[in-house]
């Protein structure tokens, strides 16, 4: 499991095994400390152009539990407009994560098939490629990640243009998405926090011009 920042740099590698990401996160020292409130996260801050206060949070998919420090999509299909917008905007944020995995798999062929080596060697390979990934993202961004390699927005702002990494790794990547892991039970206070963020994202302060056109296509 990896934690990736908004620049596509990989900050944390938690495990190298067959456990699902949500299980790895829950059992990790960081996951436990986040639940205990002992991790020094940035203080609660106001959302842009508003007085709405929100804690800083990680972005996850449906496999992860909803937490004050971890936002996941609303479940279900028949969602309100507000919830659909929230899911769309969260998916836009998750594109950074998806692109980062795509860059890794397309630039480092070792990730396109199972690693036939010892755990110790596998650890070394993964650490080396992640360090090189971060270095090249910083020192040679346009060479390592040319604009056409990653997913991007078309001129209408809301439509994806698929990156070349999708074609490069098609049918031969060893990095596959995970499904939902059981039921995620969320406290009412945390659900209210997500609702507050969702409300902000449809307000004049938080909305983007293309979001409704994209949501109305029925994908969220």
Image (cartoon, rainbow, N blue to C red):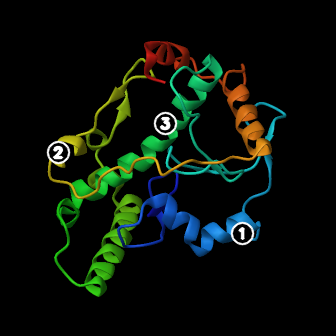
Disc 1, disc 2: CB below 8 Å?
no
- Name the secondary structure under disc 1: loop
Q: Nearest the camera: 102 or 217?
A: 217
Coordinates of residue 102 in the picture (x, y in percent): 30, 50
Q: Is residue 195 left or right of residue 213?
A: right
Q: Which residue is mark 3?
A: 91
Against 216, residue 87 (above or below) is below
Residue 40 visible to the viewer: no
Q: Which residue is mark 1?
A: 39
Q: Nearest the camera: 76 or 45?
A: 76
Q: Nearest the camera: 108 or 70?
A: 70
Coordinates of residue 63 in the picture (x, y in percent): 49, 49
- Name the secondary structure under disc 2: loop
Coordinates of residue 106 in the picture (x, y in percent): 22, 54
Label 2 crowd bin: few (<14), some (14–19), many (20+), radius 10 Å: few
- Using the numbered discs, state the Cα–Cα distance from disc 3 to disc 1 in whole angstroms: 26 Å
Against 156, residue 26 (above or below) is below
Q: Residue at x 56, y 70 (%)?
A: 27
Q: Which residue is mark 2?
A: 170
Against 191, residue 136 (above or below) is below
N-terminal label among 1 and 2:
1
Q: Residue at x 16, y 47 (%)?
A: 168
Q: Residue at x 56, y 47 (%)?
A: 183
Label 3 crowd bin: few (<14), some (14–19), many (20+), radius 10 Å: some
């Amino acid at each position: 499991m990896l934690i990736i920042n908004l620049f596509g740099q990989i900050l944390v590698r938690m495990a190298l095994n067959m456990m699902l990401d949500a299980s790895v996160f829950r059992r990790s020292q960081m996951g436990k400390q986040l639940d205990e409130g002992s991790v020094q996260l940035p203080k609660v801050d106001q959302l842009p152009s508003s007085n709405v206060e929100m804690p800083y949070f990680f972005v996850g998919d449906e496999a992860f539990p909803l937490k004050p420090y971890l936002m996941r999509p609303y479940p279900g299909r028949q969602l309100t407009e507000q919830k659909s917008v929230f899911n769309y905007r969260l998916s836009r944020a998750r594109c950074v994560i998806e692109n980062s995995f795509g860059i890794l798999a397309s630039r480092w062929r070792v990730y396109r098939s199972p690693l036939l080596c010892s755990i110790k060697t596998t650890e070394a390979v993964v650490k080396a490629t992640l360090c090189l990934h971060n270095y090249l993202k910083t020192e040679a961004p346009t060479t390592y990640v040319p604009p056409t390699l990653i997913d991007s927005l078309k001129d209408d702002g809301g439509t994806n243009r698929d990156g070349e990494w999708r074609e490069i790794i098609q049918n031969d990547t060893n990095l596959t998405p995970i499904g939902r892991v059981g039921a995620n039970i969320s406290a009412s206070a945390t659900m209210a926090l997500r609702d507050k963020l969702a409300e902000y994202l449809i307000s004049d302060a938080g909305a983007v011009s293309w979001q409704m056109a994209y949501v109305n296509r029925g994908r969220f």
